[in-house]
Image (spheres, helix red, strand yellow):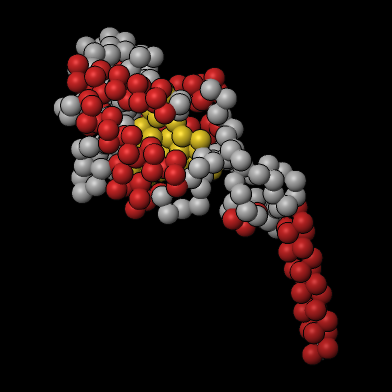
Amino acid sequence: MTSRRARRGAATLVLCLSLVAVAAATGCSPIGGRVHRSAAADGPGQGGKQAGGRAAPPVVMFLGDSYTVGDGRVQPEFTYASATARLLGWQVVVGGRAGTGFVVKRRDAFLGLFESQLGWRPAPDMLIVSGGHNDFRVPAPQVAAAAHVLLERAGQRWPGTHIVLMGPIWGTGTPPQGAIAVRDALKNLAGQLGIPFVDPIGEQWITGDPLTGIGNAPQYIKRDRTHPNEAGHRYVATRLAGDLRRLGLAEPSRKN
């Protein structure tokens, strides 16, 4: 009996080891799922080649306010940042904090949030900084000056990383003059620094007003006239993805 049990146990062990070997060789788990590897496990350098010859997904980081990280009712995994990553096949790291901006802060403004949440990480293929909505009451030159410091810091920290600046997103088609001034200042700064600028206000991503039933705002914006619902975040992701494709940055890889 003991000898028969031992033989059965040995056969089972061989079968298990064979399944593990197949999983390692094919990237499939013995129960039919995918084995998800981190970028670090596949070798150095995001956007490069994995050991098996497949291209590693780009690593993209976002820094922003409640549009980017969620407003409490929409969680980070459902915001436009995560939705854009799903559309374009990126690995994504979402940083920032609701209620913040380049100047306006909740404990930290964008520069402090960059340092504490993102800047210590290995360099991504691309960083998208999205903000200005909460800064609309701040003088536009002050907002641009703070953004300049942040963008220069990111460029120095990660010299090979693509950086994209995204202006304020507004929950109605009629943003106040302060938001327009901040948008203009950030757009001018991006031109001075030679980095791409995405302009949700200028491109009229949101039209009309959720309270009047006019435009696309009733479909995509909550009744607070500010924050997108989940459908709105998915819509914003399609607009951002379209702009990035036109800029040639849908599949970014770090510059040499």
**In which quadrant is the C terminus drawn?**
top right
Q: Is residue 47 left or right of residue 159?
A: right
Q: In the image, residue 157 lies at what x, y percent?
A: 45, 47
Identify whether 144 is placed above or below 175: below
Residue at figure coordinates x 57%, y 25% from the top left: 248
Report the front residue among 147 and 78: 147
Residue lying farthest to the top in this orientation: 214
Residue at 25%, 43% (x, y): give it.
Answer: 109
Q: Position of residue 27 (x, y in %)?
A: 71, 52
Residue 138 sits above or below residue 6 on the image: above
Viewport quadrant of the N terminus: bottom right
Instruction: Report which quarter residue 30 is drawn in.
Output: bottom right
Query: Could you tell me residue 179's position as x and y percent?
Result: 23, 21
Would you say residue 256 is visible in this rendering?
yes
Q: Is residue 37 left or right of residue 165?
A: right
Residue 198 vs residue 31: left or right?
Answer: left
Q: Residue at x 53, y 22 (%)?
A: 247
Task: State whether residue 225 appears in this view.
Answer: no
Give the residue at x 45% y 28%.
195
Foreground residue among 202 and 1: 202
